[in-house]
Structures are given as C-alpha cells and as structure tokens.
Amino acid sequence: MSKRIVCLRHGQTLWNVEQRFQGHTDIALDETGLAQAARAASLLASLRPTLIVSSDLSRANETGLALGRLVGLDVAVDKDLRERGGGEWEGLTRDEIAARWPEEYVAWEAPGGEPVADVAARVSAAMRRWASSLDDGGLLVVASHGAALRLGICAMLGLPEELWSSIGGLGNCSWSVLEEGRRGWRLVEHNAGTLPEPINSDDSPGTD
C-alpha cells in the first residue's frame, strides 16, 4: 500500500474573518475555528492516521491536537511547517496592503516577506522528512497553513514555479491528499471537506 499525506489547513481565526495577513504572527483559533477543527478531526479519524505533525503556530497546532486527542496520537511540532512570513504586511488587511503597496499587492510579494520558492522548499522538505518515517500504507496528517500547504504541495508534485498558481487554495479545515506513486507524489484530493472515495475511471492508477 502507498504512503499518504493529508495536508490539513487550520481552522478559522479572527484575522481570517478580518482578512488580515497572519504570516508568522501567532493567532489562536476562534470559536468557529475550534468547531471546524473538531468536525475535521471526526472525519479524518476514520482514516486511522499513523503520524500527526503540525506547524509551531497555535492555530495549526490546535487543529492537529483536535485530531490527536480523538485518535490517541501525540502531535509533533515542526517550525518548517509554519505559514509564509508576511514581513511588513502581517496584521494588515488586504485593503490596507493594496492602498500602501499597490505594485507589491498585485505581485503578492510583501516587503521583508518570505519568497514563495523558499516556502515551497522548506514545507515540502518537511513533508518528505516526516513521510520518510512512515511504513508502507502509513498516513501522515500535516496540520499547517493555506499558503504553506499550497506551495508545499506544488513542490511535492514537481510543478515548475510558473504553474504554481494553477493549484487553488485551501479553505479553513479543508484538506488535500497526496499519495506516493511509482514516479513520485501525486495529488488525489484537493480542498476537500469530506472523506476521499475511491475513483473508478478509465484513467488507470497504473499510469502514474
């Protein structure tokens, strides 16, 4: 059986609601986020995860802990799974950013922020590192952040940077599933809020 990675975005925070750039700022889950984490945990528990690891930021760690408590697993913490650093944008709303840095806003490159290539490299390296400790058929749950996971997934798939925007974002407490094939990792679910189901089609799994 193949190894799998469930890439789980954290639950909602007040700054999510206010559309503030969170980055490395440590913002806790709000009441809705805690409920989202509990719901996601109740679904993902049935997949019988082997290992759970989270970002060191509390919003992701709290999300991972909700699952860990349910399945009786400790949650390891890895700072390489934290969100993209937002430099001078952290704590500001999208409107404030657009008004003060119009060109940088269009490019989504924060002054003093972390380059997307650096985020993709560190997150994918962390995911590969943790996945390497799985037995065949093992399931790793990575509780992290929207940009960090999207960029990490792109790097895991070996996509060139110019195609990274073709992978959409993740909603709060939604997840994506990577599966290890003979030619590397592939994306089998993306931005899901329900459990993965087997896919039967003419696209044979033997073509990977």
Image (cartoon, rainbow, N blue to C red):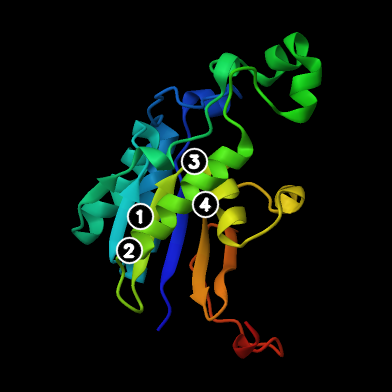
Which of disc 4 and disc 3 is earlier in sequence?
3
Q: Label 3: few (<14), some or many (≥20) within 10 Å? A: many
Which residue is under mark 3?
145
* Amino acid found under the numbered disc labelled 1: Ala
Q: Which of marks 1 and 3 is in front?
A: 3
Query: Residue 75: x, y in percent?
Result: 25, 49
* Farthest residue, direction top: 100
Distance in Å between CA atoms under marks 2 and 4: 14 Å
Q: Residue at x 53, y 76 (%)?
A: 197
Q: Residue 57, position in %: x, y?
A: 37, 32
Q: How many other residues sit within 10 Å of disc 4, few (<14), some (14-19) or many (≥20)?
A: many
Measuring from the top left, give residue 167's x and y in whole percent.
Answer: 69, 53
Q: Disc 4 or 1, which lies upstream in sequence?
A: 1
Q: Can residue 62 be seen in this view?
A: yes
Could you tell me the amino acid type at mark 4? Ser
Q: Distance between the residues labelled 2 and 1?
A: 6 Å
Q: Distance between the residues labelled 3 and 4?
A: 10 Å
Callout 2 touching callout 1 (CB < 8 Å): yes
The answer to which of marks 2 and 3 sits earlier in the sequence is 2
Classify 127 as above or below 82. Answer: below
27, 33: nearer the viewer: 27
Look at label 3 and name its amino acid: His
Check residue 75 in the rendering and tell me which mark sits there, or answer none. none
Amino acid carrying label 2: it is Ala
